[in-house]
Image (spheres, grey):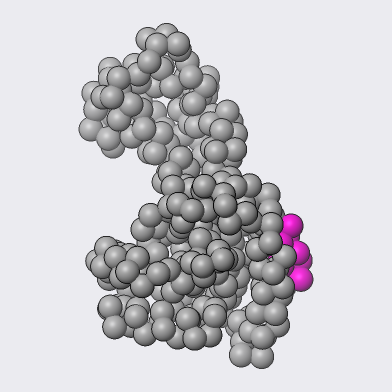
Amino acid sequence: MTSNQPLGTGVLERAFAIIRLLADSPADGLRVTEISKTIGLTQGTVHRTLQSLIDQHVIEQDTKSKRYRLSIDFFSMAARAGNPMNLRDVCRPSLIRLCASLGDTVFLLVRNGFDAVCLDRAEGPVPIRSFTGDIGGRVAIGIGQGSLSILSFLPEEERDEVIRNNLPRIKEVSRFDEVYIRLEVERIRQLGYAHKSSGLLEGMAGVAVPLRDQTGRAYAAISIGSIASRVTEERIPIILQLLRREVDIITPKISPFDPALRRSMQDFAAIMPN
């Protein structure tokens, strides 16, 4: 298959299965046999699909190890396409300022359907674990402070739909039930922010504030992730003051008439690796 030939539907499905697998794989990539075994395709089919993806500059093969990995061109395309209404560029200075002021890791999360996706992050000096991991990582909305702050400021009907859909996923990784989630949502709505150590990541804690449009609907969140000993009752007001200052800087820069914003950010991360 040459690079200028259109891909059929079946080929596209196989191609994206391989792309998603490589996105979640070690940095040194995978061999044909590993890809074949994992996604359940013959080695011949996998090899032909890989060659097509190489022709399109989506993946590359290490000449020594013979392993396949996503290409730099792919990440470049994903970075450009995964920056709806220039949100990453608008928020990047705020993330850097917060990271420098607080000394903690700062995340920019956006809604993608029933998930929250990490669109950007600024790494602090204190090593932490997070639900989304690196840029492009995702978590079910309702898990973690950032996604909870987004959930809490969705319209009620939309919020109920997300909770119904995600509750089984939340229960898979936590002890939380629907009553707990709804109580948390009400608490966050009253406070205007999310903060708590959920216990899902031992020793970790966070504080998050939503980014909202003119109707009050959340489309993203800025979240601070740190070790629990740094998120104290005495320190939370300082964190909040800095977070809210940056939200005030960001909000006027986001156009309420942007088509992407009117879609409530639901399609923002569709092209980013799972």
**Up-down: is 63 above or below 155?**
above
- In percent of width and height, residue 78 lies at 54, 37
Can you see residue 4? yes
**Up-down: is 127 above or below 23?**
below
Residue sitting farthest toward the top: 2
- In percent of width and height, residue 200 lies at 41, 73
Can you see residue 128? no
Is residue 95 inside the magenta stretch?
yes
Question: Looking at the image, which is closer to me, 252 or 14?
Answer: 252
Question: Looking at the image, which is closer to me, 178 or 136?
Answer: 178
Left or right, 36 with respect to 65, comes to: left
Question: Looking at the image, which is closer to me, 4 or 218?
Answer: 218
How many numbered dots are placed on residues in this image? 0
- In percent of width and height, residue 240 lies at 65, 79
Q: Which residues are magenta?
A: 93-101
- In percent of width and height, residue 237 lies at 66, 86
**Residue at point 49% right, 26% down?**
58
For the N terminus, the quadrant is: top left
Is residue 250 inside the magenta stretch?
no
**Residue at point 36% right, 72% down?**
156
**Residue at point 24% right, 27% down?**
41
Left or right, 131 with respect to 114, comes to: right
**Residue at point 41% right, 34% down?**
19
Residue sitting farthest toward the bottom: 234
**Up-down: is 191 above or below 122?**
below
Task: Report the predominant secondary structure element of the magenta stretch.
Answer: helix
**Up-down: is 234 above or below 226?**
below
